[in-house]
Image (tube, rainbow, N blue to C red):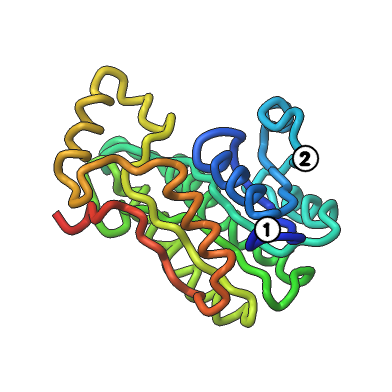
Amino acid sequence: MAGSLQGETVVVVGRGSGIARAIVDAAMAEGAHVVAAGRNREALEAAYKNTTVSVKNVDVTDETSIAALADQVSSVDHVVSTVSARARGTVGELSPEAILLSFHTKVVGPIMLAKHFAPKMPRTGSFVLFSGVAALEPDPGFLAVAATNGSVNVVIRSLAVELAPLRVNAISPGTIDTGAWEGLGKEKDAFLENKSATNPVRRIGTVEDIAQAVVFAMTNTFMTGVSLAIDGGQPLV
């Protein structure tokens, strides 16, 4: 049986693991040809060895690199940007450089992806960006993360109007079990257990939860300008 993305090309910008990898796998399962693009081409080639995934290099903080990627992809139906450069720390700890890198990576970069890919996409094409629960649930140490996530929520609405009939949506994950929490060290397990015990669905999200939402965003042709909350109801409590 043909998948919902049969014959379509999906560009996934990000790493070869975690959420990005789950999206690649889900898109392929739905029949898409996938182009995986990121800064570390060697790591991507290793991750997708013995698959049909096409691997490309791109630095989303460099518009020239984004334009080159668009030139290399002959046709594209959907672009998914999972990249981020989280600037974590309290206001007294943050540097302008870290904040700007976070903003450039998660906000400006995806805007440039839209600039260079939209002209070559069919009317049924779409963009899927990534926001996050911090935009709705600010915590100490997540100021810059909240600011960039909130910006993405504004960007998708503006792009949805400007690029119509192309669709532009975002995924807003809650606490997801990926390698992103390894930096917490010994506090990781306690952190995840607390989130699992307090959110309404009583579990931590998986990368597959996110990938399913991305496929939905790409294939639901009557949805645009929406930030899908895949967060287990985390902001409710």
Q: Is residue 210 left or right of residue 186?
A: right
The reply to whether residue 202 is in sight is yes
Which residue is drawn at the image coordinates 71% and 78% (left, top)?
123
Residue with the mark numbered 1: 1
Residue with the mark numbered 2: 52
Disc number for residue 24: none
User: How far across and down, in percent of the image, does residue 97 sit?
Assistant: 47, 41
User: How far across and down, in percent of the image, does residue 33 sit?
Assistant: 75, 51
The nearer-to-camera label among 1 and 2 is: 1
Position of the C terminus, as image quadrant, is: bottom left
- As rendered, which of 70 and 230 lies closer to the eye? 230
For residue 155, above or below residue 230: below
Secondary structure type for disc 1 = loop
Q: Residues within 10 Å of mark 2 (few under 14, many from 20)?
A: few
- As rendered, which of 203 and 169 lies closer to the eye? 203
Which residue is drawn at the image coordinates 63% and 48% (left, top)?
29
The reply to whether residue 56 is in sight is no
